[in-house]
Amino acid sequence: MTDQEGLTLNSTWSGLVYQKPNAPVSPHALVFRDVPIERVGSLSQSARNSQSESDDARLDHNLKSAYQQATLYRIVHEILLSYCGSRGQVSGSQMISIYERLLDWRKGLPPEEPDPDSEEEAPPHLLFLHIQYHVTVLQTLQPMLHTEHTDQTSRDVLTRAIVQHAQLAFNILVHYCEIYTYHHQSPVQLFCIVHVCDALVRYNSYHSAIPEVIEFALQSLEEASNGYPIARILRDSFRQAAYERHLSLPANIERRLDQKSPYLPHDVQNAFTRSTYQQPIDQLLPVLDASLGRDFAALLEKRHECDPDAMQTDGINRLDTMRIRSVVNQEDSF
């Protein structure tokens, strides 16, 4: 692995967390050149929860996953350079080109659901590759809602796409929790949980399953806090965001959270480098072309007309309340 490739893998979390370009790595450099990414024989133990069967060693394609993540974060790096760099106004054609690269990357990813005839579950790193893809799309689309010439029709198209990607990612998060555990997750994975649940709460707050979404996020972050204390700051910040949207928390969660010591503002600043985990959209708007949202929404509409299945809409307009409830009832780490 070259220094550039290692730098990409080791600094991916900084881009997602801080919304800033990481170290200056060329987005055009080849990833994992001359490295056999299908090396079979590397064994890993699955981080199954206590109610699962005993851990079995199974084949794990570590290099291939690392290659796919490095390739994804080449695109993420390009998005950050566009939104946060010094390349001038961000145009619709520029972001459409990047979006097409994201779609092409997604086509090369194995499915998150295993073959129905297989007894093997998808490995955890593959599930999070899918989640990171959806979070990347969410953070690419959300600033477009606020550009000057984004009319209501375009805003509806963009919002629908945001909700669809958030629901897809959330369903994978629930599936992950059914198989594995959120103990000792990395910071980038914790921020993915918050960004996905935040998008559902923000843009789909009327859905009957939103209380379960909030509870799932809070309990998952509490479970993960055993490995990374930053998870508790994320939990409290997400709870505050729910309050600001006038959304109530389940009474049992309120009682348990009230027993926790609140974090001070400087703790939040240290964790996020600003006062919130949310995208600094107000800082991005000056470099966004006024017609960016409208132009991009037109592309999404055109793609949907040409390929109705392009967004994988089958079943994603539902959040399975019973399934979510089953998962959150299994977690009593509070």
Image (cartoon, rainbow, N blue to C red):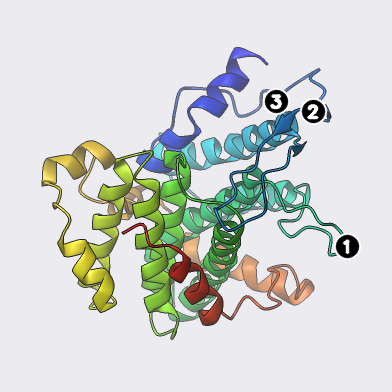
Please tell me whether mark 2 sits on a helix, a strand or a loop: loop
Location of residue 74 with respect to 55 vertically, above or below: above
- Quadrant of the image for the N terminus? top right
Question: Residue at the spot x=42%, y=66% of the render?
Answer: 216
Which one is in front in this view, the residue at disc 1 or the one at disc 2? Answer: 1
Q: CA distance from mark 3 to mark 2?
A: 11 Å
Is 198 left or right of 172, judged from the image as shown?
left
Q: Residues within 10 Å of mark 1 (few under 14, many from 20)?
A: few
For the residue pair 268 and 158, the one nearer the viewer reads as 268
Q: Could you tell which of marks 3 and 1 lies nearer the N-terminus? A: 3
Q: Could you tell which of marks 1 and 2 lies nearer the N-terminus? A: 2
**Which x, y percent locates residue 158?**
51, 70
Question: Residue at the spot x=37%, y=77% of the render?
Answer: 211
Name the residue type under label 2: Ile
Please tell me whether mark 3 sits on a helix, a strand or a loop: loop
Question: Residue at the spot x=42%, y=64% of the render?
Answer: 197
Quadrant position of residue 187: top left
Residue 278 shows up from this direction = yes
Residue 117 marker = 1
Q: Which residue is mark 2?
A: 37
- Tell me whether circle 3 and circle 1 mark residues in contact (CB < 8 Å): no
Location of residue 26 with respect to 323 vertically, above or below: above
For the residue pair 26 and 260, the one nearer the viewer reads as 260
Question: Residue at the spot x=45%, y=36% of the render?
Answer: 13
Name the residue type under label 3: Val
Residue 31 marker = 3
Residue 55 marker = none
